[in-house]
Amino acid sequence: MTLDYKGATEKYEPTLGLEVHVELNTNSKMFCSCATEFGASPNTQTCPVCLGLPGALPVVNGKAIESTILIGLALNCSIAPYSRFARKNYFYPDMPKNFQTSQYDEPICVDGYLDVEIETDDGPKTFRVDIERVHMEEDTGKSLHVGGSTGRIHGAEYSLLDYNRAGIPLVEIVTRIIPGTGKYAPQVARAYVTQLRDILRSLGVSDVKMEQGSLRCDANVSLAPIGSGLLGTRSETKNVNSLRSVERALTGEIERQANRLEAGERIIQETRHFLEESGLTRPGRSKEQAEDYRYFPEPDLVPVTPDAKWIEELRAKLPENPADRRKRLQKEWNVPDSEMNSLINAELVDVVEETIKLGAEPTRARTWWLGEISRLANEKEVAPTSLITTAFVAEIIALITSGDLTDKLARQVVEGVVNGEGSPKDVIEKRGLKVVSDDSALMVAIEAAIAAQPDTAERIRGGNIPAAGALIGAVMKATGGQADAAKVRELLLRHLGQGQETR
Ligand code: ZN
Ligand code: MN
């Protein structure tokens, strides 16, 4: 008898704990001046400091401290007036120093929180996630195992080491245990990482690309029988690298633990790896205890003692919280949840706001980004924002609003811009896209439409205004969509003696 997820959460209460590692986007590494560019040739961005050569001396990257303080402030933390680095000692081939310079008992930011909202059976509900600490450390290098079928070291013929990533500034954000989420635990975790990612992006401190590993989540979860008041043994699923995977990994892990407990087995405290294909986790190493790392204060670095005035300057620079901003924009734009969610999911909120700021009519700005531009982006399998600039979209929308372009013509302009035919102006000129607004030219088409459908014309003369649609359609067709439909309607109705009704 096995429990499914529903059964598992009816019997057991999950308790979460989330650790997120963020690579900062500083130009240089945490303790040396090596470049941090992603994707450079292996081992071209290294020096004696980040290779851990004897006698090399580290220096802290000031920009990294600034970014970390910004993160702490955005997460409602206190900033420690005095914090220190420590050596976390362990052996790993991609860590040439044999210790990671990190922070241990004296982290730079402590005691914050983040409120995350999720959709529950009873409507939206907010969960407060307490944040224990935000500390600075450095990334390790990367191992590449060659020759095996799995990419893992087992079965590989040889391994390659790339130290470009060694020493890249990392910030680790650690929550306190998160109780009381019940069956929503995986959703709360996903919402937390999503919101954290949005905040980090708004701060401009990281490129937060989960698929490139610049944002990675370690998801801890334990189970205890509901109402027992106990805290079970946790497992930690390491380096989950997409938002969806955070949710899936926890769902699978809660199910796995519940079934072990049902079978009378014990949960082992261990790290686990998430398997993308199956949604399951497999065991990694059994978890080290803090004492295994033989932490001690880093003797080669001075303590970090940020000035109180500087901290207040940084606080004053904080951008609006992205979740608050979305709520504000939704109100300003007066759009339903469904449309706002579509914009958020398509990551179009920023560009729509920018397009509106550039003067575009708000409804059109949303419709064009979410509609035609997203459609073309889907076809090309790229992000909508990579196809066209907000300035060009605003320009095209202005031409629609002024009546110089119809929607149909505007679609061709967008298509031209996307295909690299130049600016909207260039495309309009090269393709000869112009609304036919010359009355006499339109009248020729109108007369022709009336001649082709005399019965319809008669009905309109008799007061049947909706019947005009058929004739307007015929004129639009005859002019290849280049006519201004409102204008055609006005001329047609006036011509058939129904001029008053057009106002
Ligand atoms: Zn270096
Ligand atoms: Mn860490």
Image (tube, helix red, strand yellow):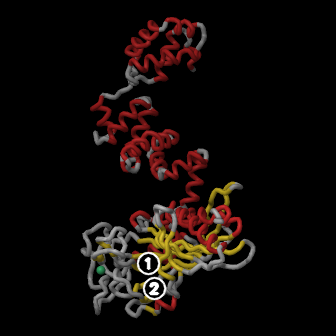
The residue shown at (44%, 73%) is: 67
Q: Is residue 245 above or below residue 418?
A: below
Q: Is residue 40 above or below residue 163?
A: above
Q: Quadrant of the N terminus?
A: bottom right
Query: Dot 1 corresponds to which residue?
Result: 65
Query: Dot 2 corresponds to which residue?
Result: 304
Marks 2 and 1, how far apart in space? 8 Å
The residue shown at (47%, 23%) is: 485
Between residue 372 and residue 398, name the one nearer to us.
Answer: 372
The residue shown at (57%, 59%) is: 323
Give the residue type at disc 2.
Answer: Val
Say which element carries label 1: helix
User: Is 78 left, or right, of 391 in this rendering?
Assistant: right
Asked if residue 20 can be seen in this view, the reply is no
Displayed quadrant of residue 241: bottom left
Say which element carries label 2: loop
Give the residue type at disc 1.
Answer: Ile
Counting labels gives 2
Between residue 10 and residue 322, name the one nearer to us.
Answer: 10
Q: Residue furthest toward the right?
A: 227
Q: Tell me residue 382's x, y (percent).
A: 38, 50
Asked if labels 1 and 2 touch by Cβ distance under 8 angstroms, the answer is yes
Asked if residue 24 can be seen in this view, the reply is yes
Q: Is residue 179 above or below residue 329?
A: below
Q: Tell me residue 113's x, y (percent).
A: 60, 72
